[in-house]
Amino acid sequence: MPAESPDSPSTGGEQAPPPEVRREPTRPSAPACFPHLERRWPLVLAAGLLGWALALAFSALRPPVYEAVAAFQVGLDYGRSAPLELVVEDRVLDRVWQLVVSDETLRMTIESLQTDIGPALDWESPAALRRHTRLDARLSRWELIGIDEDPGVAAAIANAWMGVTIQRLEDAIDHAWKAVELQGTAFRVGCFFQVGDQPVEVFWQCFSGGPGLTAQRTEEVRQEIAASHGILPIVSFELIEEATRPQKAVLYARGLVTLSGALIGMILGGTIIALRGSEASGKGGLEAEESSKMD
């Protein structure tokens, strides 16, 4: 008979116990955390209410801000020009926009405010004044808005800005017309009667010409164009409303702030409850597994 292998199972002896398999405790899946949220939804709601209250308190502690509005009308006078394409209209009006919000306009506004009110940190520089101004364009109505915690100062900022804007637009258009006049001096148009061979043949004979622009005139045209800041003579504008002292403060998105606070509170509260429930479930599963091994 062949010799019995030591690895082969013995019919007469005891069998060796199977090797022990150690299993790492597993964390519960995300759906397993939902029952903890369902049982503790009042805590999630309380966290949302707490976030809403904190956001409301934050918005209430902010100082009130007032906005004063001065408005003027901007358009294109097509009685002096052929109709322009929309893209050309946008570019023409963009030149006006850039002039209104330029640093030079704000510097002149600062000088006016220093004369009327006096020096202040809110308008010590164009960058500082820019934080207290805003330009809103609603079709042909352009609104210059002054912003400040003092309603009287807000109105003063808007009116000073408007005064400087109207003055600069008038100067720019004057220089634009001067450039057109200088360019027109380079050409001359003359017409006279031309009589033909027959007595009834009478017609107009016209010619155009001119001395052209000299170097000095060319430099004058360039200076006038630069002084016009690219504003065309067909631009028309008119002051339609001066700023008055605002009566009510502006609440900058208080509803959005409080809603965001409530959502953040609910998310944080739900996350904390879910994590604590996950840890408790993991510990409970580990204890049950160890007790079953001991049995």
Image (cartoon, rainbow, N blue to C red):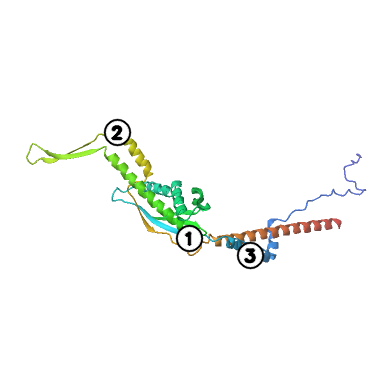
| Residue 243 picture quarter | bottom left
Sequence-earlier tag: 3 or 1 = 3
**Quadrant containing the C terminus in the rendered view:** bottom right
Sequence-earlier tag: 1 or 2 = 1
Under tag 3, what secondary structure?
helix
Q: Is residue 66 visible?
A: yes
The amino acid type of the residue labelled 3 equals: Leu
Callout in the foreground (1, 2): 1
- Which label number is shown at residue 77? none
Image coordinates for residue 58, horizontal then vertical, percent? 60, 60
Q: Is residue 140 visible?
A: no
How crowded pointer 2 is (Cα within 10 Å; few <14, some 14-19, many 20+) is rated as few
Under tag 1, what secondary structure?
helix
The amino acid type of the residue labelled 2 equals: Thr
The amino acid type of the residue labelled 1 equals: Gly
Sequence-earlier tag: 2 or 3 = 3
287 on left or right of 152? right
How crowded pointer 1 is (Cα within 10 Å; few <14, some 14-19, many 20+) is rated as some
Q: Which residue is at 23% across, 38% downward?
A: 188
Callout in the foreground (2, 3): 2
Q: Is residue 181 above or below residue 41?
A: above
Q: Nearer the viewer, residue 294 or 118?
A: 118
Q: Nearer the viewer, residue 27 or 93?
A: 93
- Which label number is shown at residue 152? 1
Report the residue marked by disc 3.
49
